[in-house]
Amino acid sequence: MKIIVIDDERPARSELIHLLKEIVPNASISEADNGATALELISKNVYDTVFIDINLGDINGTSLALAVQQILPKANIIFATAFSEYAVKAFEIGVSNYILKPFSKDQLNKIIAKCQLELTDPQTAPVLSKMPINCNRRVVMVDIDKIVFIETDNRGCMVHTQEGDFRENLPIGEYERKLSLHRFYRIHKCFIVNLDQIHEIIPWHNNCVALKMFGYEEKVIPVARNNTKELKQSLGI
């Protein structure tokens, strides 16, 4: 198992990690003391089990859980908190695993056994409608169908939406992976477009084509020659 424990309280974090090492000694365990660090780790590594405290210093645990569901749709999420009243909210966002502080080894053992069973018999992950964007030390949940296009911006990317532009320090390949189950297509090494947001296809240099997107008609987005045929097929042209 590859586990990450996210909790801003070091004693609680250490206690949980200690118990996990007793129950699953061969597991790889990472830790984060805030939401920003957690998102950075999760965007760079694949975890199958994620423990999240509800009250983190920089973000609410339920908001972070929604982000994890989008980035790691197959991961098991477990809320670890001292507040039982958050159980209802957990179920509302599809998190069925819940452990209360102080931690019980027996309860944790049952949760780990359940997670291991789900890993050996994975269910098809739901296609989520929102994508988390870590922007300016906050997480913005963006409606995926409102994303118009994404372009590279130095070492990160600019996500252009119907509701504004957001910059995030992720490579464009990560967005291509995140949006693989949606109607997005990487038309160029620097651009991913929402196929449903294309306004015009226009002739471009050297017998290529370019796109103009709804709401961004002033910007011409080139299509790589090798991607033109597949793009047209995707659009039924």
Image (tube, helix red, strand yellow):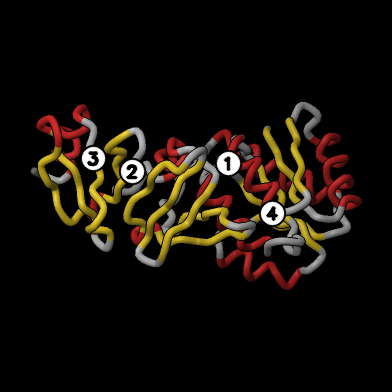
What kind of residue is marked 3? Pro
Residue 128 image-quadrant placement: bottom left
Element on which disc 2 rests: strand
User: x, y percentage for residue 118?
Assistant: 58, 41
Query: Looking at this view, is 62 or 179 the one in front?
Result: 179
Q: Earlier in the sequence, mark 1 or mark 3?
A: 1
Amino acid under disc 4: Gly
Q: Which mark is residue 43?
A: 1
User: Which marked residue is nearer to the observer: mark 2 or mark 3?
Assistant: 3
Q: Which circle, 3 or 4, is nearer the viewer?
A: 3
Seen in the image, is 53 located left or right of residue 15? left
In this orientation, which residue lies closer to the viewer: 26 or 215? 215
In the picture of the structure, the residue carrying the numbered disc 4 is 35
Q: Which mark is residue 156?
A: none
Whole-percent x and y of residue 35?
69, 54
Residue 104 drawn above or below residue 28 = below
